[in-house]
Image (spheres, helix red, strand yellow):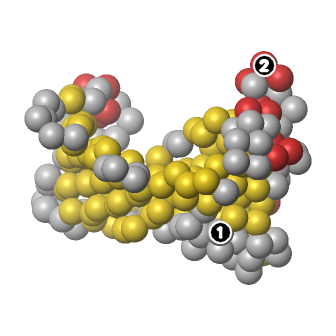
Amino acid sequence: MWDVKEQSDTSVPMEMAPSDYTKEMWDKDFLVTFKVDLESDQLKTTMTVDNKGDESFDFQAALHSYFTVSELAKLEIAGSFAGKEFLNKLAGDSGEMQTEERESITITEEYDRVYTGVNDPVLKDAGKGKSLSVLNEAGWEDTVLWNPYGNEGMGYNNFVCVESVKFDPVSLAGSGSWEAVMSLKPEAL
């Protein structure tokens, strides 16, 4: 599905274009390019969606990033959560937005929430003595937090999924382009 393009520098671009496989799900003329740059102090990703057709189309995008942690009890996810709306995807079909009151998130139950307008999460792992900033510099406007709390078979206690997301659909005009940039920057606590 992804074609990796060889580069001599630290960039690793991958491309996805329409194929028989993608056309079964979504029959649009597009090109998605995903580029990874390893810099001295961070890992930077750039995702570009190009509409190669004449008609507009809508899409959503998310980077499903899974991060190893020492244990959930020692993890705090900071950011601009307080006062932001979220959709609790485990609440069933209600689909009602709620308002987050906490400044930072701790996971003590099964978690699958879309936080709209949060694009600055920082994972603070006291067990490792490290933090990881998820820097959404362009395009990504929202954050999804997911963990299958209590599911031993999935190893729930040693990871968290922190997704950079564009939750509201992007309407991309014919021949248009959309770009999203996300960097991961580790630091000591």
Q: Quadrant of the N terminus?
A: top left
Q: Is 98 situated above or below 132?
A: below
In x, y percent, where is residue 76?
A: 76, 56
Question: Is residue 112 toward the left or the right of residue 74 in the image?
Answer: left
Seen in the image, is 187 located left or right of residue 73? Answer: left
Q: Residue furthest top?
A: 153
The vertical placement of 156 against 134, above or below, is above
**What quarter of the picture does the C terminus occupy?**
bottom right
Please state which of residues 26 and 175 is positioned toward the viewer in this rendering.
175
Res 186 visible: yes
Q: Measured from the top left, where is residue 47 in percent x and y?
A: 31, 52
Q: Residue at x 76, y 49 (%)?
A: 126
Q: Which residue is mark 2?
A: 153
Residue type, label 2: Gly
At a point 58% along the width and 38% down the height, the residue shown is 66
Under mark 1, the amino acid is: Gly
Callout count: 2
Q: Position of residue 71 (x, y in %)?
A: 79, 37
Q: Earlier in the sequence, mark 1 or mark 2?
A: 1
Vertical placement of residue 90 versus 15, above or below: below
On residue 17, the disc is: none
Furthest toward the bottom, the residue is 83
> Residue 123: which quarter of the image?
bottom right
**Front of the two marks 1 and 2:** 1
SS type, badge 2 = helix
Please report the residue visible at 38 percent of the width from the left and 36 percent of the height from the top: 25
